[in-house]
Amino acid sequence: MVSETPNLPSPQDALLPDRHPQHDLFICDVADAVLKDVMPQMEHPFYSLSKKPEKNIRRYEHNGQWIQVTPSVKGLATIYDKDILIYCISQIMAKLKNGEPVSKRVRLNTRDLLIFANRGTAGKDYTALQEALERIRGTTISTNIRTGDEEQTDTFGLIDSSSIRRKHGLDGRLLSCEITLSDWVFNAIRHNEVLTLHRDYFRLRKPIERRIYELARKHCGQQTSWKVSLEVLLKKSGSRSSDKEFRRAVRGLAQSDHLPDYHVTLDGTTDMVTFQNRGTMKAAIEGSEPWTGRVDSDVYGDVRNVAPGWDPYYLEQEWRSWLGDNEIVPKHPERHFVKFAKSWFDKRGRP
């Protein structure tokens, strides 16, 4: 029997090359910055997956939540434009970790941003960065999605403003820019509604691969696995692909096995997609630091995911009390906390 895919690339070959292997020397003046994204941006399809300008209004509804995304004349912000916001979020979270003051207004060194996002640093890359800023600023969102303990039904942008500094002359290279994040994005950061992304996120070649990784990271988290129908995955991705094209893309991910943090399998009979945790996430979140009795802020996002409606800080108190009552010292505290929260929700449902 002849294989349909006789010459599959290796997982590493399926990824873009790491253009800046010494990137940590350049990251936003914070040497240990880790990729971070806010959960609502990972859950819902805010960004275009097309490399061509998308100028149609998009509306997405799921389980009582809705968003409407309206482009400017330059088109919707794309998932590659989102790199700018990931950089801003990562910088703010790194500074919060170090106890430094933060604000909605973030100053970026454009070269550092390009290196952080595994991009080139030629003139065309700086031009593309400016165009991305314009699309992000022009994209307007209406939504009822919650951030923290608030629910907004407002219309707003992902950023409020940007200011670019460049060398003198029309062809002068961008030196730096300042971005003012919207209240909605900054509110999600302040409420720890963030998750860590694998560094290889920026090495994923295709927009749909990035989007599928975001959904797996949001829904599977540190759990052993997550199953979802191909139909729902397509809907949540925001892809304009046909069912056949999307199935082919997921099958390709499963065969090449290059998605960071998760193995992907597609059951062709039931059209169910399974994401299985590779076990790489804990190292990405904690590094080599020993357990100190505190949980990483990423875990609160995973807890919100498995126990929707419950305050993760309240569940943490209940979990710690349960550990004490049973004289248990967990070997993997974050994973244990997530399992406890899931069990709590399974027994009690929404509050």
Image: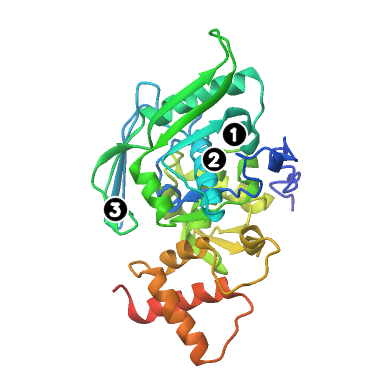
Q: Horizontal and vertical percent for residue 7?
A: 76, 44
Q: Name the residue at the left extreme.
A: 153
Residue 216 in view (yes/no): no
- The quadrant holding residue 185 is top left
The residue that appears at 53% across and 56% down in the rendered structure is 217
Residue 322 in the image: above or below residue 112: below
Mark 1 burial class by Cα count in 10 Å: few <14, some 14-19, many 20+: many
Left or right side of 7 for 311? left
Confirm or deny contact between disc 2 and disc 3 (CB under 8 A): no
Residue beneath disc 2: 87
Residue beneath disc 1: 113
Disc 2 is placed on an element classified as: helix
How many angstroms separate mark 2 from mark 3 (CA)? 27 Å
Confirm or deny contact between disc 1 and disc 3 (CB under 8 A): no
Confirm or deny contact between disc 2 and disc 1 (CB under 8 A): yes
Mark in front: 2 vs 3? 2
Q: Horizontal and vertical percent for residue 4?
A: 68, 47
Q: Horizontal and vertical percent for residue 261?
A: 63, 57
Residue beneath disc 3: 65
Q: Name the residue at the bottom extreme.
A: 326
How many angstroms separate mark 2 from mark 1 (CA)? 7 Å
Mark 3 burial class by Cα count in 10 Å: few <14, some 14-19, many 20+: few
The residue that appears at 62% across and 75% down in the rendered structure is 332
